[in-house]
Image: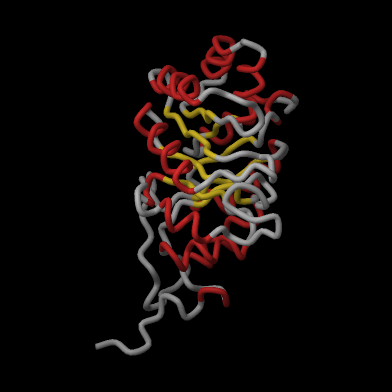
Amino acid sequence: MNYTLKNIPERTQKPRQYGFTMAMDKGLSIREVEDFLDISGDFIDIVKFGWATSFVTPNLKEKIKVYHDAGIPVYFGGTLFEAFVIRDQFEDYRKVLDKYDLQYAEVSDGSIELDHDKKCDYISKLSEQVTVLSEVGSKDAEKIIPPYQWIKLMQEELDAGAWKVIGEARESGNVGLFRSTGEVRSGLVQEILTKIPFEKIIWEAPQKAQQVWFIKLLGANVNLGNIAPNEVIPLETIRLGLRGDTFSHFLDLNPS
C-alpha cells in the first residue's frame, strides 16, 4: 500500500484459498488486458472469460498468455461448457482446455436442463484434468430454487470434486441469489451458510450494493465474482473499509 492506516482489515495473501476476487472479462483487447493488469493485477485472483466469449475472441492464445504471464489463471464461462455438452461434444471441450493450457474449468447448468447426477459426473471427470468451479443456480429469473435444494446441489458438487461452488447471479446480478431488482435473497444466503462453509463459495455479486452486503455479512475476505474490470479497485476499497459504504464497519472506535 502507498501509506499506513490503522484499523484496516487483514486481507488474505495471494495465492489465496479465500478472499477471492474473480473478475469477468467480456471481451477486452490484449492492450486493455495489459492496462487492466497493470493497475489491478495485485487484487485479481482469477479471471473468467464471460459465457462463450472465448469462441469469438481474436488472438485468444496470446490474450491468455498475458494473464498467465502475470500469474493470474483464467477459465471459460460455464455457458461454453454447456454449449459443448448440449451438442454431445464433452470430449472436444476437454481438448479445448488442453489446447489453451487452462488449469481451471467451470461446470454449470444455468442454460440447459442437465440431470444432476450427470453434472456431478462431469465435475468428477474434469477434476482429474483441471481445478473445477461448479455453478449452482439458473439463469432463468422465473426459476426459483428453494434453499434446501441449493444446499443439496452445492454439497453434492463439492463431494464430486468441485474446488469451489459459485452462486449464480449472471453478469447483471438479477437472478439466482438475487431478486429481479438486484436485492439479495438474504434468507437464502443465510440458510446456505448454515451448511456450506463460506470459504467454499464464490458469490457472484456484480453490483456495488451486493458486494457491500456480502462484505458486511462475511467480512473483507469473502469470495466475490463477476466483478467488472473497472470495479476491481473500488471493490478492494470496500473490502478495506475505505469507501463510504463500509467506512465505519471495520473501525474499532472504542478500543478496550
State the image coordinates of residue 60 (x, y, percent, origin top left). Answer: 66, 25
Residue 50, position in %: x, y? 66, 36
Pick whichever, 208 or 107, lies toward us. Answer: 107
In this view, 227 is above or below 89 = below
Residue at point 58% right, 34% down?
A: 66
The structure residue drawn at horizontal position 47% and vertical position 38%, both measured from the top left corner, is: 71
Q: Nearer the viewer, residue 116 or 62?
A: 116
Evaluate whether residue 194 shows in this view: yes
Q: Is residue 166 left or right of residue 181?
A: left
Residue 37 in sight from this viewpoint: no
68 in relation to 17, above or below: above
Q: Is residue 135 above or below residue 252?
A: above
Q: How is this picture coloured?
A: secondary structure
Tell whether 57 sits left or right of 176.
right
Choose between 85 and 143: the one closer to the eye: 143
Name the residue furthest left.
256
Percent x, y of residue 44: 51, 48
Q: Which residue is drawn at 41% across and 58% down?
A: 221
Kindly indicate the quadrant of the structure image that contains residue 55.
Answer: top right
**Residue 133 % position (x, y):** 47, 34
Q: In this view, does 229 lie above or below 253?
A: above
Q: Which residue is drawn at 66% across and 31% down?
A: 111
* Quadrant for the N terminus in the image: bottom left
* Image quadrant containing the C terminus: bottom left
Side (left or right) of 201 relative to 93: left
Tag count in the figure?
0
Using residue 137 as the reference point, say whether residue 219 is left or right of it.
left
